[in-house]
Amino acid sequence: MGKVGAVPNRRLASVRGVPATSPPGRRARLSSPGTSHQPSEAREEMRRRLRNLIEGNRVMIFSKTYCPHSTRVKELFSSLGVDYNVLELDRVDDGPRVQDMLTEITNQKTVPNIFVNKVHVGGCDRTFQAHHNGLLQKLLQESSANDYDLIVIGGGSGGLSCAKEAAILGKKVMVLDFVVPSPQGTSWGLGGTCVNVGCIPKKLMHQAALLGQALQDSRKFGWEYNQQVKHNWETMTEAVQNHIGSLNWSYRLSLRENGVAYVNAYGEFVDLHKIKATNKKGQETYFSASKFVIATGERPRYLGIQGDKEYCITSDDLFSLPYCPGKTLVVGASYVALECAGFLAGFGLDVTVMVRSVLLRGFDQEMAEKVGSYMEKHGVKFLRKFVPLMVQQLEKGSPGKLKVLAKSTEGPETIEDVYNTVLLAIGRDSCTRKLGLEKIGVKINEKNGKIPVNDMEQTNVPHIYAIGDVLEGKPELTPVAIKAGKLLARRLFGASLEKCDYINVPTTVFTPLEYGCCGFSEEKAIEVYKKENLEVYHTLFWPLEWTVAGRDNNTCYAKIICNKFDSDRVIGFHILGPNAGEITQGFAAAMKCGLTKQLLDDTIGIHPTCGEVFTTLEITKSSGLDVTQKGC
């Protein structure tokens, strides 16, 4: 079938979009070579061939290359991921007679002239009207030869969101989800990374560590207890895993209630509209669909050194580890690395973080260094500018003993030490290379496996879409995938045109002292807007809860980055302090509404809270004034 950008045929007789050529010096005609027809016979032949085009193609567009309305209609079908066949009437020899015949058939004199599943939709305006009121989607789904309207590959947050929304809109939907076990043999249930080995268990273990700090603070607030307080890893992990198990079940139940077919099998494309599903027993089943959404996410990266996959663990393994990890080396400086190092240290473990270059690459570096400084003051050791060369097992056990040899990135120096556990958190790789995408022509970034898409989450193959962490250049965050998945389903199967807004997405790093941010880092803001066009307001602050507890009064920090030439609009928001995620969420909504410094100044703060500090910011970095706090 002809697709977007196909070269139109010179002869109407070439129905299926295969380019037809004419001998030199001869113009292509409707009649077959060597055959003559009376005018009435020629008309009937043309009518028959037009009927063949209309009935032989799901979407048939009669168009002219220079017509802007025709272009709009083609773009609409492309955005919907619908293949169409087009006949450009200004490119065929008998174009005027074809248009006359179309007028006779449809009583429409203009182009574009669109047919969907043999039904005459009309011109540009009527096609868009049909799209908005849902009629076009109904027409497109009629007489579908595929098993499903939509197959979602990946049962994580984004994939489930998209599948459920499509089902709510009345579509026949399947979700394929299969977790390839980690090198340590860890696998999990439905829900993806966030639920099973990401946000949910991470936040719960972060909370467990905060409770340990609260126990220390409680004595200053009058709580008296004599018994030795200690943390039990097994009790915590059992509770966390029980909660995750309940979420797995609720996701399966939700799919069932919405009529979504769930298949626990690995999906791989074998054709443009067909996929092979392989279950854990190796049994293969084939399914077809009109559209596909790739939502396969990412998995932790390994170092590629001796002993890494044999003896090291990743975040895939940590949250269900059946024993306390003991003395731990965390390799990497990503948010995953620092979050895990933070809560492990909060349990009283001996934790070292080995950092190749900078902390929290891509985040504001002033904030990143403050995060690291707080962790270092609270017992986490940092080995800067080192990378592991080898991991060797000295003793088996739960945990065992591992010797790590590491090399400086700045010279020949090598060091070695012994740990019970080595946790790798050096980044993640997209799960796209074994999906058969090369068989159907879907382009990926060969360097990182990411999938480039347009602003409709559409790949270069019109009926294949992608959402979530596999997207190139988009935030790798669960709420982003959920929003993108839901909006994609509404555009594909509803009357919506709303796109996912990837600008000013807030996030929080759940290190022992939380770091929340929204918008530009200071480095990126300077790169985009130039330093002289910015004003940075900042301050250190002392949470009231920390005062009686005797905790440092000049550790928590807040700053906003304002564009001086856009009414001091806030383009970067940053906070390091307790409950940073809760604070950032509210200010992110304000930034969506165009928050300015004046609006912050006009806002009355809630006292006593950490968030109120943003309503009283006065000191700018450019002033050079001291921001240390000396009282409440």
Image: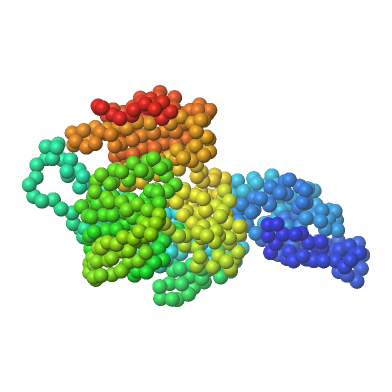
Name, please, the residue furthest toward the top: 602
Please give left or right for residue 438 compared with residue 549 in the image. Answer: right
Q: Position of residue 302 (x, y in %)?
A: 40, 63
In the displayed structure image, the side of residue 149 where residue 217 appears, left or right: left
Q: Position of residue 183 (x, y in %)?
A: 36, 68
Kindly give the residue lying farthest to the front in the view shown: 412
Toward the viewer: 238 or 447? 447
* Residue 271 placement: quadrant: bottom right
Residue 101 visible in this rendered orientation of the protein? no
Closer to us: 556 or 206 = 556
Position of 291 compared to 363: left or right? right
Question: In the figure, residue 623 lies in which quadrant?
Answer: top left
For the C terminus, give its image quadrant.
top left
The answer to which image quadrant residue 191 occupies is bottom left
Of 278 and 140, nearer the camera is 278
Name the residue rendered at 45%, 38% in the picture: 522
Question: Residue furthest toward the left?
Answer: 226
State the quadrant of the N terminus.
bottom right
Please tell me which residue is depicted at 61% across the width and 52% down the height of the picture: 79
Which residue is at 51% across, 71% downward? Answer: 276
Tag count: 0
Task: Look at 28% across and 70% down and name the residue there.
Answer: 393
Q: Is residue 356 left or right of residue 496?
A: left
Q: Is residue 555 above or below residue 495?
A: above
In the displayed structure, 587 sits above or below 512; it is: above
Residue 365 in sight: yes
Q: Where is residue 479 shown, x and y percent of the image?
A: 42, 48
Q: How is the image coloured?
A: rainbow
